[in-house]
Image (cartoon, rainbow, N blue to C red):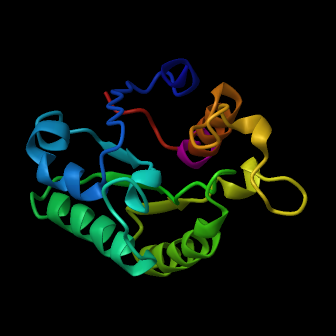
């Protein structure tokens, strides 16, 4: 439902499963360069800390910076909306790393008006700041429809006031 929520802005969705930020940078020409979007929304997944990669917070931030700087090297003016990693019920050991990643991303983006850091974790949390399982699928990793609606509303709120590209 992201297309409806962000209408009249055109939306091109490229869900990449367990791809990492480094994978996106590697396939930049096919995923970003070819389409020349006016905005890029990045939602790093748990694969940054698990499965194929075991990045530290500084390593993840460095990978995101590298992707943005590489994209900017083409001289295309673009807005970047970067979600911080999502705290999930199944990986409580990642919470400190995610908090550090959030702090580092916010510090890096502070003087970059083209970069917006979106932290959805407070919108997905219980009163004790732990992830609310009601926003996750049964696997405890992936967001369900209600979780994605919260992310979409956060993005929509950040986009409010911007004019839709032609």
User: 36 above or below 92?
Assistant: above
Q: Is residue 4 left or right of residue 42?
A: right
Please say whether residue 41 is visible from this viewpoint.
yes
Q: Nearer the viewer, residue 8 or 34?
A: 34
Please say whether residue 44 is visible from this viewpoint.
no
Q: Nearer the viewer, residue 26 or 31?
A: 26
Which percent across, then down, holds residue 88? 64, 52
User: 152 above or below 123?
Assistant: above
Residue that appears at 47% across and 73% down: 105
Range shown magenta:
156-161
Which percent across, then down, holds residue 109? 44, 73
Q: Nearer the viewer, residue 163 or 51?
A: 51
User: 162 above or below 104?
Assistant: above
Which percent across, then down, holds residue 67? 23, 62
Which percent across, then down, holds residue 166? 31, 27
Q: Residue furthest right?
A: 127
106 within the magenta span: no
Residue that appears at 18% across and 55% down: 25
The overriding secondary structure of the stretch rendered in magenta is: helix
User: 143 above or below 100?
Assistant: above
Residue that appears at 32% across and 62% down: 53
157 within the magenta span: yes
Residue that appears at 14% across and 48% down: 28
């Amino acid at each position: 439902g992201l297309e409806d929520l962000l209408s009249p802005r055109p939306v091109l969705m490229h869900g990449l499963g367990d791809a990492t930020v480094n994978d996106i940078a590697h396939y930049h020409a096919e995923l970003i360069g070819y389409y020349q979007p006016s905005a890029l929304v990045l939602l790093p997944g748990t694969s940054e800390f698990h499965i194929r990669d075991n990045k530290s917070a500084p390593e993840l931030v460095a990978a995101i910076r590298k992707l943005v700087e590489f994209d900017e090297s083409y001289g295309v003016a673009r807005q970047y909306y970067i979600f911080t990693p999502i705290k999930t019920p199944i990986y409580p050991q990642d919470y400190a790393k995610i908090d550090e990643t959030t702090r580092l991303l916010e510090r890096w983006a502070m003087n970059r008006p083209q970069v917006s850091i979106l932290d959805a974790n407070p919108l997905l949390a219980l009163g004790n700041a732990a992830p609310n399982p009601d926003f996750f699928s049964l696997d405890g990793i992936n967001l369900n429809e209600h979780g994605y609606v919260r992310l979409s509303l956060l993005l929509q709120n950040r986009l409010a006031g911007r004019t839709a590209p032609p």
